[in-house]
Amino acid sequence: MLEIRELRSRYGRIEVLHGIGLNVQSGEIVTVVGANGAGKTTLLRCISGTQPVSGGEITFRGETITAVPAFRRIRRGITQSPEGRQIFTNLTVEENLRLGAFLFTDDRVGKDMEDAFQMFPILREKRNLAAGGLSGGQQQMLAIARALMGRPSCLLLDEPSMGLAPILVQQIFDVVSGLKALNVTVLLVEQNAFGALKIADRGYVMETGQITLDGPAEALIADPRIRESYLGI
């Protein structure tokens, strides 16, 4: 579904992605783990179209999208739940969700919202409240639900467990795992390597703008290098 070849990106003169290569097959959950500053967020922003690419190629469903504007990538089926949630705090929960469906005017929008409320019941209870009044965990639920309102075939998730209590982290990972049943392919970026790899099919390890290791998730969990560096074992 998604293939990245020799991807490079820079901020000014400083190159932060140095020839990244990875692929995501339809129906998979693929996770990218690595320390803060490894370039994981930049990678997702390049895929979603919000960060310029200075070299390499991004292919989605067999078509090159490297220069395609971000809003057209949404039309093609790529949406992103960004790091830090970035919800619209002054708008209500429902208004945030409707913004996630900004490309659509058909009757399915109401059903999409009902699906989001079934996935995250607390959002139904707070649908008419300002999103800024939600807890951190509820804001993360809203960010994921808003991305799903774009009807993605490929969902990019950037650090969904960041700053959450352990019980909420498990709830978020359970939701991500359940997306496979909805035919949503997921590329998940996480510092919580163990939690992310437990629900993933495959994983990539990213260090200082490069992929240093990849393989089946179970193999990465068992790898002594990963256990020592990222799992604290």
Image (tube, rainbow, N blue to C red):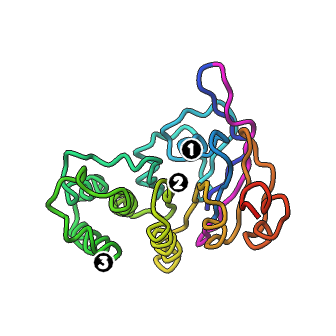
Contact, CB < 8 Å: mark 2 with mark 1?
A: yes
Identify residue for label 3: 118
| Rendered image quadrant of residue 14 | top right
Amino acid at pointer 3: Gln
The residue segment tinted magenta is 13-29
The residue most toward the right is 224
Residue position for label 2? 159
Residue 214 located left or right of residue 59 = right
Against 33, residue 110 (above or below) is below
Q: Secondary structure at mark 2?
A: loop
User: Residue beneath label 1, please?
Assistant: 41
First reached walking from the N terminus: tag 2 or tag 1: 1
Q: Secondary structure at mark 1?
A: helix
Q: CA distance from mark 2 to mark 3?
A: 23 Å
Residue situated in front as seen by the camera: 231 or 160: 231
The amino acid type of the residue labelled 2 equals Glu
